[in-house]
Amino acid sequence: MPEPESVRRFVFICQGNICRSAFADQVARDLGFDSMSFGLSTSADGPAHPPAVQAAADLGVDLSTHRTQRVEDYAPQPGDFLLAMEVRQLARLAANERLRHLPRSLLGRWARPARPHLHDPYGLDAAYMTTCLRSIETAVADLVRSYPAARLSQGR
C-alpha cells in the first residue's frame, strides 16, 4: 500500500467504465477528492449503463453525465493510486508496461464488509446492482479516510 501522504488521486478501474469504476469515481468526487476512472476494455466517450445510472440515483449519486474513458487515454500523474474491482484487472495493470510502476490495490479491500472481488453487475438484476454500488460506496468512504491527501484543495 502506498503511504497515505503520497496519494494525490484515486484512479478507479473496471472492465467497461460504465458501472463500478464510474460510480466509485463520482462518489469520491462528491466527497471532495481528486479521482478519475477508466475501463480496460471499453470504447471512449460512452454513457454509463442505464441500470447503473438508476441505481446510483437511488443512492443519491448522479452518473447521468459520465463518459467512458479507455486505459489507452489514461495519463498517469505522480500520486496516482490505481484501484481495481477484480484480481484479474490487477494482473492486467501489472502486465501493462506503462502502468506497472504505479501503486495498485483492490477497492473492495476497503468495503465493509470487505469484498475483494466486486463482481461486475452488468447484465445482472437491479438488486445486485444496488448491492454492488453500496459496497463500492462504503469502500470509497473508508478509502478517503485512509488517504486524506487526495482531498481537493484551493491550491490544486
Image (spheres, helix red, strand yellow):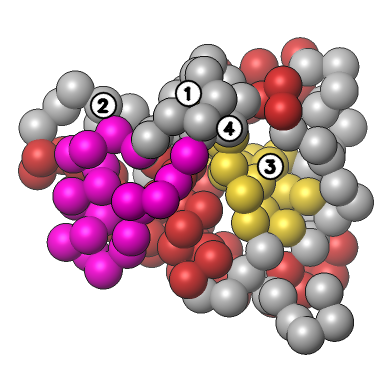
Q: How far apart are marks 3 and 4 (CA)?
A: 15 Å
Pointer 2 and pointer 1: residues touching (CB < 8 Å)? yes
- Residue at 32% across, 63% down: 61
- Which stretch did the figure color magenta? 48-67
Looking at marks 3 and 1 on the same chain, the residue that comes earlier in the sequence is marked by 1
Pointer 2 and pointer 4: residues touching (CB < 8 Å)? no
List the residue tagged with mark 4.
Answer: 69
For marks 2 and 4, give the one nearer the viewer.
4
Question: Crowding at label 2, few (<14), some or many (≥20) Cα neighbours within 10 Å?
Answer: some
Q: Which amino acid does label 4 sit on?
A: Gln
The correct choice, above or below, for 92 with respect to 36 in the image is: above
Q: How far apart are marks 3 and 1 (CA)?
A: 14 Å
Confirm whether residue 93 shows in the render. Answer: no
Q: What element carries label 2?
A: loop
List the residue tagged with mark 3.
Answer: 82
The correct choice, above or below, for 137 with respect to 43 in the image is: below
Q: Distance between the residues labelled 2 and 1?
A: 10 Å
Position of 12 compared to 97: left or right? left
- Residue at 63% across, 56% down: 35
Q: What residue type is labelled 1?
A: Gln
List the residue tagged with mark 2.
Answer: 122
- Residue at 48% across, 71% down: 30
- Residue at 52% across, 19% down: 43
Q: Is mark 4 on a helix, strand or loop?
A: loop
List the residue tagged with mark 1.
Answer: 15
